[in-house]
Image: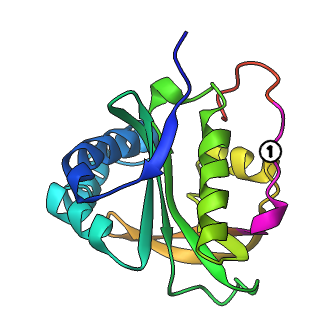
Amino acid sequence: MTPPLTFRRGSADDAEALALLAAQTFLETYRDFEEVQDNTDYVAKHFRVPAVAALLADPQATTLLAASGAELAGYAVLRAGSTPSCVTGEKPLQLERFYLAEAAIGRGEGTRLLRAVQAEARRLGALTLWLGVYHRNARAIRFYEARGFCQIGERDFPFGGRIFVDPVYAIAVDEIRFPEPTGRSRES
């Protein structure tokens, strides 16, 4: 049996490993949705080691890492700052990225990572957690809705030379629900 993941904040020393994981999880998540070249271009721009090192050094961002032993298996990025007008909750914080490697999906690790996100959001003083999600990513939408997130609006997301209109979800940090596992689920 695979041991549960452990969680910690990322540091500059994690840039190379996180860049590899971020590229892997992005490609795993979106391989069936968009053109391969668009995905590859996005990864080349956003998940190179220098870009990830800049993210880890950004004072407006907090990166949480999920590890299985010494190997990274997931991550989440929380970001303070610009918020779309549809987010009206107090003290908002964006859940900018939330990814698990395929091998970690279906074991309740997504819920555990979200618990770590909730704890970090509280530590940062946030009262509202918001996120944008790709409208075709039904698994992610089911995950967030099952935990109480509600769609509150939309926002534009440029990708591959096009503009996608992604739903925006939000929830009060203290109202996130954590359903009990009922067996293997591809959503957790």
Q: Is residue 124 left or right of residue 47?
A: right
Q: Residue at x 30, y 58 (%)?
A: 11
Nearer to me, 73 or 143: 73
User: x%, y% of residue 136?
Assistant: 59, 50
Describe residue 177's horizontal placement relative to residue 78 as left or right: right
> Can you see residue 32?
no
Which quadrant would the C terminus be assigned to in this image?
top right
Mark 1 secondary-structure assignment: loop
* Viewer-closest of 149 and 127: 127
Which residue shows up at 67% across the image and 35% down it?
A: 187
Residue placed most toward the observer, 11 or 26: 11
Q: Give the range drawn in magenta.
A: 170-180
From this viewpoint, which residue is outermost toward the bottom? 85
For the image, the number of numbered tags is 1
Instruction: Tell me, yes or no, whether the highlighted magenta stretch contains residue 73.
Output: no
Q: How crowded is mark 1: few (under 14 residues within 10 Å), some or many (20 or more)?
A: few
Asked if residue 141 is positioned above or below residue 1 in the image, the reply reads below
Q: Is residue 47 left or right of residue 162?
A: left
Point out residue 138 in the picture as x, y percentages from the top left corner. Answer: 65, 45
- Is residue 172 within the magenta segment? yes
Residue 109, given in percent of the width and then of the height, sits at 60, 34
At horizontal 24% and vertical 69% (from top left) the residue drawn is 54
Q: Which of 94 and 71 is in front in this view?
A: 71
Q: What residue type is labelled 1?
A: Phe
Give the residue at mark 1: 178
Residue 114 in view in this figure = yes
Q: Which colour scheme is used?
A: rainbow
Quadrant of the image occupied by residue 142: top right
